[in-house]
Amino acid sequence: MTKPKSAQKAKPKPAAQKLDTITIMQKIGLFVEEQTQQVIKLLERQKATPEEKIAAAMGLKVNATRRLLYDLMEKGVTKYEKKKDKKKKWWYIYFWSLDTERISGFVKAFKLKELEKKRKLLEEEKKYEFECKTCEKKFLHEDALESDYLCPQCGSALEQARTSSTIRKLEIEIRRLEGEILRIDQAKQ
């Protein structure tokens, strides 16, 4: 026996998946080695971590770890804070963390590029005013007029193009990207 619709529980909407730093870097075209990925994962779990602790956790010498951290800093992913060591005079301890502001800036720039691509695709798709239902080709108004509103390939009559599923999908994708960019901007405030 099934429950009436009003008594059935609504399926919860999936939460927006938070991307990890490595996935973000791959999406924007910054690829890193396996050891560097381990550093990133460690920094995602701990904030302001001394390089000695990172080296110990990875089983590397401090100099090798420092090279990995500087490589990430050059890519704009990490930053450090330098503090005087209380035990040793003239010695500094470097505390490393992910530069979340720059990472979100990378994500925003990537999403803006994607948004621009989608808008151009939408603009191109909307140019077509006529289509052939037989061979599924689309035509500009001028091209349809020149061919007397007959398909040059199969000779079928051209029909006025309806809003296609491609256009609807692009519009949905554009709204989604605009929302994501807005959330990034709001998170910075």
Image (tube, grey):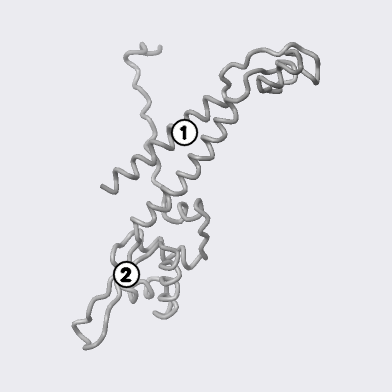
Quarter the N terminus occupies: top left
What residue did someone put label 2 on?
A: 80
Quick one: label 2, few (<14), some, or many (20+) residues within 10 Å? some
Q: Earlier in the sequence, mark 2 or mark 1?
A: 2
Residue drawn at the location 32% of the way across and 15% of the way down: 7
Q: Position of residue 28 (x, y in %)?
A: 50, 53
Q: Are marks 2 and 1 in contact (CB under 8 Å)?
A: no
Vertical arrangement, residue 26 with respect to residue 172, above or below:
below
Q: Residues within 10 Å of mark 1 (few under 14, many from 20)?
A: some
- Residue 121 x, y percent position in the rendering: 57, 34
Q: Amino acid at mark 2?
A: Tyr
Q: Three-letter amino acid code at disc 1?
A: Ile
The mark found on residue 9 in the picture is none
The answer to which image quadrant residue 66 occupies is bottom left
Mark 2, secondary structure of its residue: strand
Q: Quadrant of residue 100?
A: bottom left
Residue at 45% x, 52% y: name it: 24
Identify whether 57 is placed above or below 161.
below
Please tell me which residue is depicted at 55% across the width and 30% down the height of the picture. Answer: 123
> Is 189 or 52 nearer to us in this picture?
189
- Residue 183 percent location from the top left of the image: 33, 41
Say what secondary structure mark 1 lies in: helix
The quadrant where residue 128 appears? top right
**9 left or right of 175?**
left
5 vs 24: above or below: above
In the image, 46 versus 143, the foreground residue is 143
Image coords of residue 91 (percent x, y): 26, 85
Please tell me whether mark 2 or mark 1 is closer to you in this view.
1
Q: Which residue is mark 1?
A: 174
